Amino acid sequence: MTAESLSGAAEPYRFGPAKALRAASDAVPPSGLVLLAILSVQVGAGLAKNLFAELPPTAVVFLRIATGALMLLVVVRPRVRGLSRRDLAVGVAFGVSLGLMNLSFYEALARLPIGIAVAIEFTGPLTLAVVSSRRRLDLLWVLLAAAGVLLLAPWDGAGAASWAGIGFAALAGAFWAAYIVFAAATGARFPGASGLSFAMIVSTIVVTPVGIATGGAGLLRPEILLLGAGVGLLSSVIPYSLELQALRRMPKRVFGILMSLEPAVAALVGLFVLGEVLGVREWAAVGCVVVASIGATRSGG
């Protein structure tokens, strides 16, 4: 899940892998770059879910955010000189929402198939987009997404979803909406990409106590550290690089429509990577969220 990329607040910055990928990405259509970025994010989530057999979700979140923060700090140092206390407070809120969003999503991922978790989480930014719109038609997209979530609810005790998983996924969506708001405010107050770097440090501080407490000595195992770095690379560095290249070559609305396919891609990754087989009702629910997201993007919401 690249919540960061949907916020529109992070300005272009250069990771080492981005330089290596730039020449190759020029030969790939921008739509292909977006799909590759989505696939990278979801494969990273799948790898993280496999780690749950070794570590609890909170410890895996710590590994992902900490390694991502370290990778970002290599190229971007947060610049806070001259910023007011209000500016710093906005940056802190940005980082806190990022940390809580990931903690909630990984807890949902531990209880739900990845496609269902991503579909429910998507209702957060979708609702924010509709609330920000003055078009009555956009209410239809919220209702359609809500219908999808209702299809997933285990009313009869059957299905792949659980109430706890749905609750964590919905909470992740709410924090995602907050993240988007604070990301935009941070981008306007911090120079360059230093706001994102600052937020990543704050997010690391937020998740470190619970991550270390639950992960314990398991976090020091070399193979676990390597896998955690892989999660950070697949979930952050590679998709950021691909999406920035794509955004330079395509309209933002087209980019948003393509990103709306993420729940469907997540469900396919769950099927082929994790062996998570969804029923007809679950696929219909994912389809409702995808269509709602595309509709909200096309209508300008």
Image: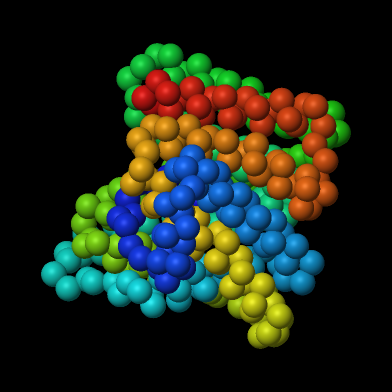
Residue found at the far front of this picture: 27
Q: Position of residue 136 (x, y in %)?
A: 40, 14
Relative to residue 118, is residue 235 depicted above or below? below
How many numbered marks appear?
0
Q: Quadrant of residue 265?
A: top right
Residue at position x 52%, y 73% in the image: 67
- Answer whether residue 1 is visible to the viewer in this image: no
Q: Residue at x 41, y 60 (%)?
A: 22
For the point 49% across and 47% down, which residue is it? 28
Where does residue 21 sit, x and y in percent of width and height? 46, 62
Q: Is residue 29 above or below residue 21?
A: above
The single residue placed furthest to the left in the displayed view is 82
Residue 93 picture location, percent across and down: 36, 57
User: Which residue is found at the position 45% from the left and 67% from the top?
Assistant: 20
Q: Nearer the viewer, residue 100 or 41?
A: 41
- Residue 6 quadrant: top left
Visual colour scheme: rainbow
Q: Position of residue 168 (x, y in %)?
A: 63, 48
**Nearer-the-camera pick, 114 or 131:** 114
**Which residue is the extreme one toward the top?**
136
Horizontal side of residue 298 vs 222, given as left or right: left
Q: Is residue 221 visible?
A: yes
Q: Quadrant of the C terminus?
A: top left
Relative vertical location of residue 202 with respect to residue 130 in this rendering, above or below: below
